[in-house]
Structure formats: C-alpha cells, structure tokens
Image (cartoon, rainbow, N blue to C red):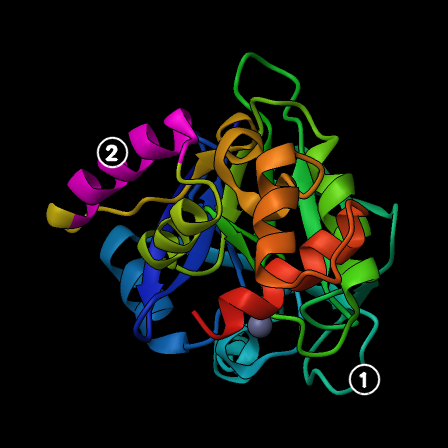
Amino acid sequence: MLIISPIPAFNDNYIWMFHAPDSQDVFVVDPGDARPVEEVLSRHGFNLAGILITHHHFDHTGGISELTRNRNIPVYGPDNRNINGITHTLRDNDTVKLSNCQFEIMATPGHTLDHIAYFTDSGDDENPALFCGDTLFVGGCGRLFEGTAEQMYSSLSRLASLPDNTRIYCAHEYTQANLKFARAVEPNNQKLQEQAMQVAELCSENRPTVPSTLRTELDTNPFLRSDQPEVIQAASDRDPSSGANPVDVLRVIRAWKDNF
Ligand SMILES: [Zn+2]
C-alpha cells in the first residue's frame, strides 16, 4: 500500500509524492521545482529516498539538480541523455521496486518520444496506481510535441488496458478545460455531464481533480474513445476527410483541441 499526495508546483503542475504508511522515506515524481518539495519534506520530517521522471520537459525535471545536491539518492527516468541527473535508466517493461511496491515501466511515446509511465498494482485491496506524466490527463491527453498520432494512440491503448480501478495520477490540473472540450466532442455523453459537475464542485473548493480512475476516463475522455460512434462523428464533422479509423479520429480531435 502507498500513501500518495500531490505537491502543487508552478501554475498547474502536480509533483506526486508517495511512501509506505509506516515509512518517512518518500519518492517524488517529476519534481519540476525543488522548493515546494523541500517545504513538504521539512514540514513533515520526510526523507527524500528517490526521484522518478516521466519525460524531459523542464517543468518535470527542473528540480533534480537541487534535490540531489546534498543527497545520494537514485533518480529513475527514461533513456534520454538530455536529462541531467538520471542515475537509473528505465525502458519499456522494466520493473523497479520502490517503497515495497513493484512498478512496471511502460513506454508511452506521443507527447515526447522519451515518455514513460510508472504502474503499480500494490497487490493488496488498494487500487493500482499509474503515474502517467503528460501522456494521459483527466479528460484529455498530452499535446503531440514530438510523437505522432499513431504513437499516442498506441500509448493510450496500452494504458486503457490496465485494470479499470487504476488511479490516474497525471502531472497537470487541466481537467476543467479538458472537460469543456470533451463536452464539445460528445455533448450527449451523460457520464461526462456528471463528471463535469463533480469537477466544477472540486475546483470551486480549490481541491485537486486528480486522481481520476481509468473507468471514468474510459467513459468520458474523448482521447480514449476514438472508436466510439459519437467521437468518430464529431471528428468527421470537424474534418470531412477523417474516416472511422481511431488513429485518424485521434489525430483530428487532438488538432481540434490544440485550437479550442
Ligand atoms: Zn510535457
């Protein structure tokens, strides 16, 4: 079992922190900024035991050098020499044991080419957890900065095959804008309307909308629903050359979202 909590950073980033219930040794995922992490560590008397990185963008890696300056700790991350400070390179299907939990590494190219996600099924009655960086968001997916729609489709399809009760720990609070777009794509999706109301309530109380569950995402996230008739129709209304192929549908709705 893991206790997982967000450390807000910058405007809308979440640096996820996790630890075993009986331990003060914590890991952080994608520390773009060292300062809020140091504050949480000292406030709770936690000891930073390691860092996990999903991809090379600076808002996910900018805190590595400061956090490791006076600590001899492992920094796990993708096989990308442009990220300074990685001590343990991880590749697709690798496993790594942290806080007594086994994590599986999934390569998820699309947003960037080096992107990886960390999945753990802690093996007890807790829900599994996925740290997916900027690949899958609540209600959306990452922009295609480096990869293709084919790559993003295949990455999202792999994540979609995880257990339904997997908690989705993405790296940004983009949910409200994402759901506004999702409702433009699927105005008749009842579950999406319900989720939008719950999210509006959380946001009005300044509470995180993350994590979501994979079940919710499968029901509401248009980027996981590019094989659904209403999403296919919305894509072809947007771009008449788009067919029913889910990769084409994903490409069209991703480009639509970029300008939404
Ligand atoms: Zn990014």
Q: Quadrant of ligand 1?
A: bottom right
Q: Is residue 18 magenta?
A: no
Q: Is residue 184 above or below residue 112?
A: above
In percent of the image, x 67 and y 23: which residue is there? 163
Q: Secondary structure at mark 1?
A: loop
Query: Which residue is more in the foreground, 26 or 235?
Result: 235
Residue 244 horizontal side relative to residue 256, left or right: right
- Nearest-to-viewer mark from 1 and 2: 2
* Amino acid on which the number 2 mark rests in the picture: Gln
In percent of the image, x 52 and y 72: which residue is there? 258
Q: Is residue 196 magenta?
A: yes
Residue 230 horizontal side relative to residue 11, left or right: right
How packed mark 1 is, by other alpha carbons closer than 10 Å (few <14, some 14-19, many 20 or more), is few
Q: Position of residue 13 (x, y in %)?
A: 39, 66
Image: magenta residue range: 188-203
Residue found farthest to the top: 125
Residue at which label 2 appears: 198
Q: Position of residue 169 (x, y in %)?
A: 50, 46
Q: Position of residue 93 (x, y in %)?
A: 88, 46
Spatial separation of the CA atoms under disc 1 and disc 2: 41 Å
How packed mark 2 is, by other alpha carbons closer than 10 Å (few <14, some 14-19, many 20 or more), is few
Residue at which label 1 appears: 81
Q: Which mark is residue 31?
A: none
